[in-house]
Amino acid sequence: MIAGGSPQHRFPAGFALLIAVAAVSWAAILVRLCDAPSLGIAFYRMLFATLAILPWGLRSTGPVSLRTYGLAVTAGVLLGLHFATWISSLAFTTVASSVVLVSAQPVFTAVLGPLFLRERPGGRAWTGSASRAGLSRIWSPRRKPGGSWPILPTESA
């Protein structure tokens, strides 16, 4: 059920999760099939997402500090840069290589977290990051004989 929804308007959370995962899973393929410029795709993706969540953001929840606004704007700019660079990367490599790199975020978090946030990942985090890194190596597309995995366009087979 959606939070705050009435009993007669129930929506199964599992079904919503299934739809969300399917939408995210198809994003790279649909972006690759699109003929629009990469920055245009990134812009409209951010615009439509912002418009979709704007009603919840405009609800009054009390005073919000300037620091909170600044953090929100910074997060939005960084997310926009992420989409701009990721969508642009699809023009230079395969969809599979791009998705492998983008989904390696847990590995980067485990490695960089102690440096920037002074957070030490526990054993489960390192196990998950190591297994993620291993799956990236195993599942990498177009593995070349001899053990190299092409990521950049200049390394393509």
Image: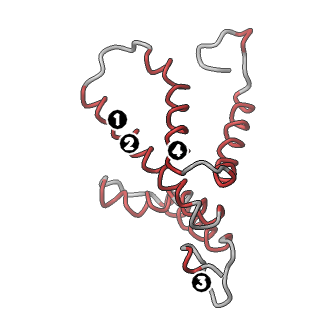
Image mark for residue 40: 4
Cβ–Cβ under 8 Å for marks 2 and 3: no
Q: Earlier in the sequence, mark 3 or mark 4?
A: 4
Cβ–Cβ under 8 Å for marks 1 and 2: yes
Q: CA distance from mark 3 to mark 1?
A: 40 Å
**Residue beneath disc 3:** 148
Residue neighbourhood size for the residue with mark 2, other residues' Cα within 10 Å, grouped as few (<14), some (14–19), many (≥20): few
What residue do we see at 61% from left, 68% from top? 136
**Of 8 and 121, the residue lying toward us:** 8
Q: SS at mark 3? A: loop
**Residue beneath disc 2:** 77
Q: SS at mark 4? A: helix
Check disc 2 and give the amino acid type. Answer: Val
Q: Earlier in the sequence, mark 2 or mark 3?
A: 2
Check disc 3 and give the amino acid type. Answer: Ser
Q: Earlier in the sequence, mark 3 or mark 1?
A: 1
The percent coordinates of residue 148 (x first, y second) are 59, 83
